[in-house]
């Protein structure tokens, strides 16, 4: 019983570092694909050296530039990498609102399929999610699941 309690209490250890990394990568992607991207390799290095510690709190080692191996930036994600974290926010919200009480509910699964998946790329996903949730999406469940802002 005590072991289980301590394990549950520690489940969010390191979550903030992972979130900071995702925020850093998303911001890096948006900056590179934005209106005033770096003009050369030195500018890219300066961007990495400036953003990494500013967002993640981790200094960038001298001449280390992960852009050389970060394929997401140029592989169909141009300025959309932030979507990884946004998908976590939305899925946490949908789970807590609709599926948490019964993750295997056939009714909830069909509702999700019809209201979120079936429309595909037609219309705004925010409209589909609002209809599905019965309200605007919220980040509260995402934060709570990570122990942020929860007492």
Image (cartoon, rainbow, N blue to C red):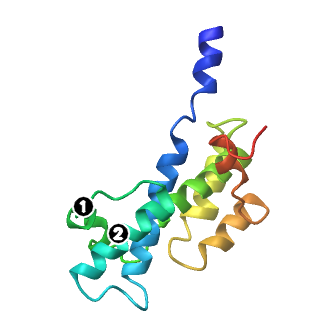
Q: Mark 1 and 2 residues: CB-CB less than 8 Å, in contact?
A: yes
Drawn side of residue 74 relative to residue 6, left or right: left
| Image position of 65 with respect to 100: above or below | below
> What label does residue 64 carry, if any?
1
Q: Residues within 10 Å of mark 2 (few under 14, many from 20)?
A: many
Choose between 54 and 99: the one closer to the eye.
54
The x and y percentages for residue 9 are: 64, 25
Secondary structure at badge 1 equals: loop
Drawn side of residue 15 relative to residue 107, left or right: left
Label 1 vs label 2: CA separation?
Answer: 9 Å
The x and y percentages for residue 104 are: 61, 36
Secondary structure at badge 2 equals: helix
Drawn side of residue 138 relative to residue 119, left or right: right
The x and y percentages for residue 70 are: 27, 63
Choose between 113 and 90: the one closer to the eye.
90
Q: Residues within 10 Å of mark 1 (few under 14, many from 20)?
A: few
The x and y percentages for residue 101 are: 73, 36
């Amino acid at each position: 019983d005590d072991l289980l309690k301590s394990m549950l209490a520690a489940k969010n250890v390191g979550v903030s570092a992972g979130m900071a990394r995702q925020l850093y990568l998303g911001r890096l992607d948006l900056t590179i694909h934005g209106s005033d991207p770096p003009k050369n390799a030195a500018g890219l290095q300066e961007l990495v050296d400036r953003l990494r510690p500013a967002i993640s709190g981790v200094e960038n080692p001298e001449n280390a530039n992960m852009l050389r191996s970060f394929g997401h930036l140029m592989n169909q994600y141009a300025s959309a990498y932030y979507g990884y974290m946004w998908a976590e926010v939305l899925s946490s919200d949908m789970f807590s609102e609709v599926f948490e009480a019964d993750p295997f509910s056939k009714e909830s699964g069909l509702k999700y399929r019809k209201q979120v998946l079936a429309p595909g790329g037609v219309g705004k996903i925010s409209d589909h999610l609002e209809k599905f949730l019965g309200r605007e999406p919220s980040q509260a469940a995402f934060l709570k699941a990570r122990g942020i802002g929860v007492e």
